[in-house]
């Protein structure tokens, strides 16, 4: 192993292996389909195959899992996520269902009729329910 011809053979062999590995990585195809690993006669496999056959224009079904996120701390990010999904050209606008915008509009933003209801509510009850201190005469105002 100390002689020059042996060192050259080892180096050539190492470079040849490296070259074949690089060639293999360069030609690697990522053609993964999870349906291949489902049971042959399962409902799931038939569902996906028939969806592709009868509804090819709808593309792939995708679910975006946000995780255990305290949404009340990340309202702007969730609104931005909705905008990004709606403005992405690869997403069919009619197929997009995102819960946050409707939830925010229905439950987090006071509508004018709700403001009128709160104005009629006794001030001390507002503090008890919502933790809002209106004892100094402050009233709900429309923005």
Image: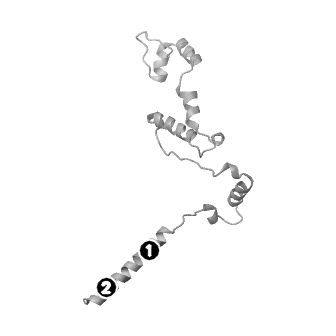
Depicted 107 relative to depicted 23: above or below: above
Q: Relative to residue 137, is residue 96 drawn left or right?
A: right
Query: Considering only order in the chain, which callout, 1 or 2, is on the residue closer to the N terminus?
Result: 2
Label of residue 129 in the image: none
Residue at the far right: name it: 54
**In front here: 33 or 7?**
7
Quick check: 70 above or below 128? below
Q: Nearer the viewer, mark 2 or mark 1?
A: 2
Q: Residue 8 carries which label?
A: 2
Q: Where is residue 35, by image quadrant? A: bottom right
Query: Taking 81 as reference, is 14 left or right?
Result: left
Q: How many marks overall? A: 2
Q: Position of residue 106 (x, y in %)?
A: 58, 28
The way the protein has been coloured in the rendering is one colour
Q: Which residue is drawn at 29% across and 86% down?
A: 7
Assess disc 1: are there few (<14), some (14-19) or many (≥20) residues with their C-alpha within 10 Å of its C-alpha.
few
Residue drawn at the location 47% of the way across and 12% of the way down:
139
**Cα distance between the residues tagged 2 and 1:** 20 Å
**Whether residue 131 is situated above or below residue 9 in the rendered picture:** above
Q: Position of residue 43 (x, y in %)?
A: 71, 59
**Residue at x 68%, y 58% (from the top left corner):** 44
Front position in the image: 105 or 12? 12
Spot occupied by residue 133 in the image (x, y as percentages of width and height): 42, 17
Residue located farthest toward the top when viewing the structure as drawn: 137
Helix, strand, or loop for circle 2? helix
Task: Please determine whether, in this image, residue 80 is positioned above or below residue 138.
Answer: below
Query: Where residue 21 is drawn, which disc sits there?
Result: 1
Query: Could you classify mark 2 by the number of other residues whose Cα lies within 10 Å: few (under 14), some (14-19), or many (20 or more)?
Result: few
Determine whether the residue tagged by mark 1 lies in a helix, strand or loop. helix
């Amino acid at each position: 192993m100390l002689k020059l011809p042996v060192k050259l053979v080892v180096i050539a062999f190492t470079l040849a292996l490296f070259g074949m590995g690089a060639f293999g990585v360069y030609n690697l195809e990522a053609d993964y389909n999870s349906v291949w690993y489902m049971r042959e006669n399962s409902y799931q496999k038939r569902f996906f195959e028939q969806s592709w056959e009868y509804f090819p224009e709808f593309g792939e079904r995708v679910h975006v899992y946000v995780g255990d996120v305290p949404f009340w701390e990340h309202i702007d990010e969730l609104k931005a996520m909705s905008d990004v999904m709606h403005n992405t050209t690869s997403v069919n606008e009619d197929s997009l269902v995102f819960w946050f915008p409707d939830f925010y509009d229905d439950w987090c933003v006071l509508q004018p009729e709700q403001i009128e209801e709160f104005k009629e509510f006794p001030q001390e009850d507002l503090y008890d329910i919502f933790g809002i201190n209106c004892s100094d005469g402050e009233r709900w105002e429309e923005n």
